Image: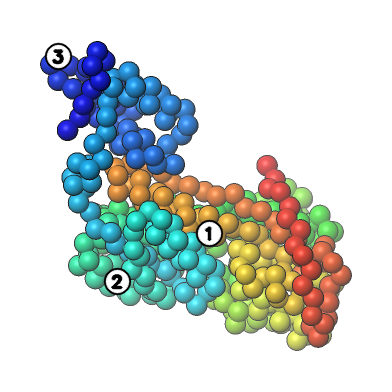
């Protein structure tokens, strides 16, 4: 039921204004008006102001109780994580859970362990819980066609951290390409000219974006992006250790490496130390994600801050928008990244040997254009 103030204009003769009337008068969609009425952060300030002016002019009063009855949605949200063994995804899950709690939802957490069959099984099983929505970090190799034939076609769903090419589902994650470019530019600025890329697989869209950023920086500096300098591996500590050991055994050893993520970088620093070299002096290392362990690594890890908690919060907010009728094409979000300089790249406090503990404070470098 809607009401109008005495004397206020109405959308039609003898009847109160409806949300459809407000949308038409403001020149926006019904879902946008709904988001404004619910105070969603997904609406641009200028759009919000325009809609609020129309609401004021028509004297429209939102009946929240009736809307909640119409919505009649579950309070459960499926949260699918591709690899909970990776501390980055653990931090992401915590960020999503915190935001969902504040929004009145309870997550049902599932780890797909990078297994496509397991991911499909979990999604089908979650259908039984009458979910309000799903937030998922897709398993490696996920395709748009596969997701389109699962419950994601009928349940509001947000993809986070890994894009799925061709999927209409909104994506929320960091700017992987820009972040990797900043990491590589940092090393170039320190005088390195033979910079390797370590970790990850080409089947991961995040890997594709981060390698693109590595190439962008090298090409901009007039340096070759030599394919032989890419050392793929599992995105784990063990993978980083193995890939870095292979790199160090190459005939022309790189002087610096950009890593797929922080856990790969932590494994790589161990391989460098085991080879009798000093990280930050003999080989510079940069990671990606800025997980909690990065500052405690020996030496502390220069990395790219992906804003993990913020990404988790934004994913929850975008899902709320979808639940309330937002257009999936309008609510995705690509977050800014920042370079965090520590000792592993040789630009922070003096690099330490593997036997000397060091935990200098990080220097936050503002994002470049």
Kind of element beneath mark 3: loop
User: In the image, is 269 to the left or to the right of 106?
Assistant: right
- Please indicate whether residue 345 sits to the left or right of residue 61 in the image: right
The residue sitting at 32% across, 18% down in the picture is: 57
Q: Are marks 3 and 2 in contact (CB under 8 Å)?
A: no
Query: Going by the image, does 187 lie left or right of 88?
Result: right
Mark 2 closeness class: few <14, some 14–19, many ≥20 residues within 10 Å: some
The reply to whether callout 2 and callout 1 are in contact (CB within 8 Å) is: no
Residue 230 appearing in the image: no
Q: Compare residues 331 and 364 and report the one nearer the observer.
A: 364
Which image quadrant for residue 2? top left
Above or below: residue 272 compared with residue 149: below
Q: Nearer the viewer, mark 2 or mark 1?
A: 1
SS for tag 1? helix
Disc nearer the start of the sequence (1/3): 3
Which sits in the foreground, 113 or 295?
A: 295
Q: Residue furthest front?
A: 6
Q: Nearer the viewer, residue 256 or 82?
A: 82
The residue labelled by disc 3 is 13
Q: Which residue is mark 1?
A: 309
The residue carrying mark 2 is: 122
């Amino acid at each position: 039921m809607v009401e109008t103030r005495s004397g206020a204009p109405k959308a039609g003769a003898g009847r109160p204004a409806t949300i459809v009337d407000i949308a038409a008068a403001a020149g926006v969609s019904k879902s946008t008006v709904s988001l404004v009425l619910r105070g969603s952060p997904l609406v641009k300030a200028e759009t919000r102001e325009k809609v609020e002016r129309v609401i004021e002019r028509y004297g429209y009063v939102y009946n929240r109780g009736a809307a909640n009855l119409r919505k009649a949605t579950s309070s459960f949200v499926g949260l699918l994580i591709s690899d909970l063994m990776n501390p980055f995804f653990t931090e992401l899950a915590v960020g999503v859970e915190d935001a969902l709690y504040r929004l009145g939802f309870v997550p049902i957490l599932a780890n797909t362990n990078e297994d496509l069959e397991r991911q499909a099984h979990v999604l089908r099983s979650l259908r039984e819980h009458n979910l309000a929505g799903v937030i998922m970090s897709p398993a490696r190799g996920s395709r748009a066609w596969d997701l389109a034939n699962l419950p994601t076609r009928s349940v509001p769903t947000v993809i986070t951290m890994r894009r799925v090419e061709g999927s209409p589902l909104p994506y929320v994650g960091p700017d992987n390409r820009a972040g990797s470019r900043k990491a590589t530019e940092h090393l170039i600025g320190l005088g390195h000219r033979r910079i390797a890329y370590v970790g990850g697989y080409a089947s991961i869209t995040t890997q594709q974006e981060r390698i693109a950023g590595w190439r962008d920086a090298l090409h901009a500096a007039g340096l070759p992006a030599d394919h032989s300098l890419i050392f793929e591996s599992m995105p784990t500590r063990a993978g980083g250790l193995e890939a870095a050991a292979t790199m160090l055994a190459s005939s022309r050893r790189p002087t610096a490496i950009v890593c797929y993520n922080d856990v790969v970088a932590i494994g790589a620093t161990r391989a460098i130390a085991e080879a009798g070299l000093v990280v930050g002096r003999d080989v510079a290392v940069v990671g990606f994600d800025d997980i909690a362990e990065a500052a405690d690594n020996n030496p502390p890890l220069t990395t790219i801050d992906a804003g993990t908690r913020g990404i988790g919060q934004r994913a929850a907010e975008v899902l709320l928008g979808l639940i309330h009728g937002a257009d999936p094409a309008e609510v995705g979000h690509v977050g800014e990244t920042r370079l965090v300089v520590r000792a592993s790249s040789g630009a922070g406090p003096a690099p330490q040997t593997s036997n000397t503990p060091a935990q200098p404070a990080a220097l936050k470098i503002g994002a470049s254009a």
